Amino acid sequence: MKKCLVMVGTYNGEKYLREQLDSILSQKGVDVFVKVSDDCSTDTTPEILSEYKNKYDNFEFSVNDTNKNFTYNFLDLFFSVEDDDYDYYAFSDQDDVWLPEKLYKAVEIIENKQMDNPNGILYCSNLYVVNEKLERIRMQEDESIEKCNKNNFMFENIATGCTVVFDRTFKVHAQKYYPQGIRLHDYWLFLIAAYTANYVYDRNAYILYRQHGTNQIGSNKKKWTLGNIKKFFGYKGGQSKLAEQLIEGYGDEIDRDYYNDLIYLRDYKKKFKYKRKLCFGKKHKKRKHNFILKLKIIFNKL
């Protein structure tokens, strides 16, 4: 069986953590190993992790010296994996539930989609959005996900971190450059895959993606609530920084047409002609909510 390392980031996750860990450790058809980085939790999360370490030989955890926040807790955990003992690697949140075949299905699809690319492949999938009681609300994505391409990826991420699985070759490729000042680790890795390696999206779902009051990252489809309007004007952006770091770390490996588009995104706050290209270029758009995208460009929110 294939060996899979699951990297888990925790922070004050005591309420749902056991359910999440049990579902990971119960995966079928693969050999699972779990590595957890706790970001200075102040609840009983470290005690729960210690309990699992004492119970399972395929489980280890560490506690950060200082709080790194969500993204860099995951990124530093990822960069700490120096060995090649595993065939596949995955990320996990602390509050979801994985269906038993989650990892096996990802590995199966990756191996069926292997392509002639020296930089490996990253898998991501759909999700069952559920409430706190794990009652299903909806699928996260609809059929429009299949229309996504490298033009969309400049503005939207289709790879939710807890669905991401990648092979050893991609792990090595993605560890060539440590990004500075980015906001989302899953978006970063997906962009590397989309622009310099391979990716595959699975429309099926194998995770119960729990929504509750303390989600660090959630799934809110109500775009025009008062709270989201306030959030919009407080938003500091993130895509332009991702573009900057992608160019810095992997610019030589990106197709020239897309490289130029990333330049527009990186520098649009400083050059009006780039802002105009992003606002009115026919290929620069999202699947939905393009009016909001244009507002973000105008107000320097990317």
Image (cartoon, rainbow, N blue to C red):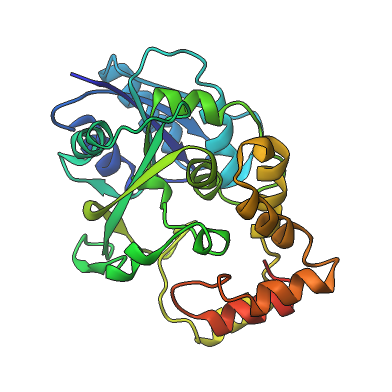
Residue 226's quadrant in the figure?
Answer: bottom right
Q: Position of residue 133 (x, y in %)?
A: 22, 62
Which corner quadrant holds the C terminus? bottom right
Q: How many marks?
A: 0
- Residue at point 42%, 65% (across, down): 213
- Residue at point 27%, 69% (across, down): 143
Q: Is residue 52 left or right of residue 93?
A: left
For this orientation, the residue located farthest to the front is 256
Q: Position of residue 221 (x, y in %)?
A: 40, 76
For this orientation, the residue located farthest to the right is 270
Can residue 69 be seen in the rendering of this structure? yes
Q: Is residue 77 left or right of residue 32?
A: right
Instruction: Give above or below for 245 relative to 145.
Output: above
Q: Nearer the viewer, residue 199 or 185?
A: 199
Q: Is residue 111 left or right of residue 82?
A: left
Q: Position of residue 81 (x, y in %)?
A: 50, 20
- Residue at point 61%, 54% (across, down): 258
Q: Nearer the viewer, residue 246 or 133?
A: 246
- Residue at point 19%, 25% (across, down): 30
Instruction: Give above or below for 9 relative to 83.
Output: below
Which corner quadrant holds the N terminus? top left
Can residue 63 be seen in the rendering of this structure? no
